[in-house]
Image (cartoon, rainbow, N blue to C red):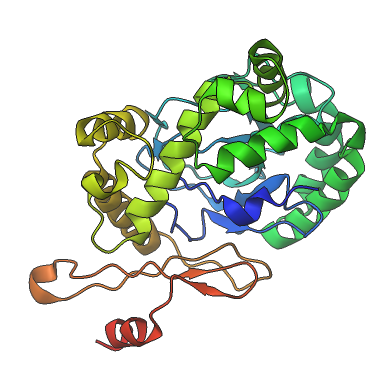
């Protein structure tokens, strides 16, 4: 069993979002190596009009269920790994009561729950039945009856544990992903192939079958995600300081690469993440307290001219640790 989830926690464009229409729940310990989170609405509600949201490459794949409780109907889809950013379609206000439930796999783990190859899923959306028919058949009836997201997560865990196919496990893939993450994506395909004693062609076939992208593409996405994590967590991030750390040729190369995946420059991306979370938090009621919530990002705002003075990125780790930590500063900002 791999422990990559301890080394690598990919983030969305609004990673600190946590409201009644979207919250994340950590899976049980047996599924953490494979599934980043369960996510969705806290419970059924009438849909509000919403604007589109920025979706960035997060090196994950999702199964998404959209349940219309008023009409007793459901739509489901499987979203393959993305290497392009896009804006999701907004929604109009609806009188029907609906809810959403999603399962987010790490890209290298999605194939462990399917008999199908992931080759060809990049930047594509499918009906769930084409890759996860057994999961769809087992979970859909439950989602009509069980509406609380925590209860849904528990039911999904039971199904996923039954579907986990140990025969699909490839130790050589674990070795390759481990080496890739250890270098934060800054590794050439030839070097990676040498480390796991495969030819470049063999490694490329393995990655295509299990992740849907080439080793070079996944390395680039992982490097971008590590960079995005630094932008979010460092109080005074500057691109020049990350050039050498992530193997970019210069600052211009870093900014071009980041914008290619995010559509925004680092400062703009961080500002969007904070402002979008504020808008969503104010327009939706907070989620009910429940078990195993994913890390929560707290922000502290100054009131001078209504401008944000400081950003607290206070991550509550799934094991109970507080990182990064400066409790005195946190308490000072929260009280001020």
Find residue 60 and report its horizontal and vertical position in percent.
59, 37
Vertical order, 31 against 329 (above or below): above
Quarter of the image where the C terminus is located:
bottom left
Find residue 334 and report its horizontal and vertical position in percent.
32, 83
Work out whether residue 277 or residue 227 is closer to the camera in this orientation and state it. Answer: 227
Q: Which of the 4 quarters of the picture holds residue 266?
A: top left
Residue at left offset 72%, top offset 39%: 72
Q: Which of the 4 quarters of the picture holds residue 324?
A: bottom left
Residue at left offset 89%, top offset 35%: 165
Vertical order, 118 against 285 (above or below): above
Q: Find the residue positioned furthest to the top.
A: 201
Residue at left offset 69%, top offset 70%: 291
Is residue 73 visible in this depiction of the protein? Answer: no
Find residue 100 and report its horizontal and vertical position in percent.
61, 45
Residue at left offset 38%, top offset 66%: 313
Work out whether residue 276 or residue 168 is closer to the camera in this orientation and state it. Answer: 168
Find residue 304 and report its horizontal and vertical position in percent.
10, 75
From the viewer's perspective, tell me whether residue 70 is left or right of residue 232.
right
Q: Which of the 4 quarters of the picture holds residue 115?
A: top right
Vertical order, 213 against 333 (above or below): above
Work out whether residue 44 or residue 116 is closer to the camera in this orientation and state it. Answer: 116
Is residue 157 visible in this depiction of the protein? Answer: yes
Work out whether residue 106 or residue 203 is closer to the camera in this orientation and state it. Answer: 203
Q: How many marks?
A: 0
From the viewer's perspective, tell me whether residue 139 is left or right of residue 218.
right
Vertical order, 321 against 167 (above or below): below
């Amino acid at each position: 069993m791999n422990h990559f989830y301890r080394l690598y926690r990919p983030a969305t464009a609004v990673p600190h979002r946590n409201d009644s229409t979207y919250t994340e729940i950590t899976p049980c310990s047996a599924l953490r190596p494979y599934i980043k989170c369960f996510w969705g609405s806290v419970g059924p509600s009438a849909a509000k009009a919403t604007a589109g949201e920025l979706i960035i490459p997060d090196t994950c794949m999702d199964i998404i269920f959209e349940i219309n409780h008023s009409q007793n109907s459901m739509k489901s889809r499987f979203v393959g790994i993305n290497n392009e950013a896009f804006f999701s379609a907004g929604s109009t206000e609806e009188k029907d009561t609906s809810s959403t439930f999603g399962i987010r796999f790490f890209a290298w783990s999605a194939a462990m729950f399917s008999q199908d190859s992931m080759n060809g899923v990049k930047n594509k959306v499918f009906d769930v039945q084409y890759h996860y028919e057994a999961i769809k058949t087992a979970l859909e009836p439950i989602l009509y009856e069980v509406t609380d997201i925590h209860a849904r997560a528990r039911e999904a865990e039971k199904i996923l544990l039954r579907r986990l196919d140990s025969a699909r496990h490839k130790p050589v893939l674990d070795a390759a992903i481990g080496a890739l993450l250890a270098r934060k994506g800054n590794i050439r395909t030839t070097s990676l192939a040498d480390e796991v004693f495969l030819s470049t062609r063999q490694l490329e076939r393995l990655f295509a079958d299990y992740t849907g992208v080439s080793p070079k593409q996944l390395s680039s996405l992982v490097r971008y995600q590590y960079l995005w994590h630094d932008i979010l967590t460092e109080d005074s991030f500057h691109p020049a300081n990350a050039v050498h750390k992530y193997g970019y040729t210069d600052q211009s190369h870093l900014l071009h690469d980041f914008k290619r995946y995010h559509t925004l420059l680092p400062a703009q991306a961080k500002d969007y993440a904070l402002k979008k979370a504020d808008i969503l938090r104010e327009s939706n009621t907070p989620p009910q307290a429940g078990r195993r919530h994913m890390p929560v990002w707290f922000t502290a705002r100054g009131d001078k001219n209504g401008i944000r003075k400081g950003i607290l990125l206070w991550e509550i780790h799934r094991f109970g640790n507080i990182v990064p930590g400066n409790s005195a500063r946190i308490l000072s900002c929260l009280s001020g």
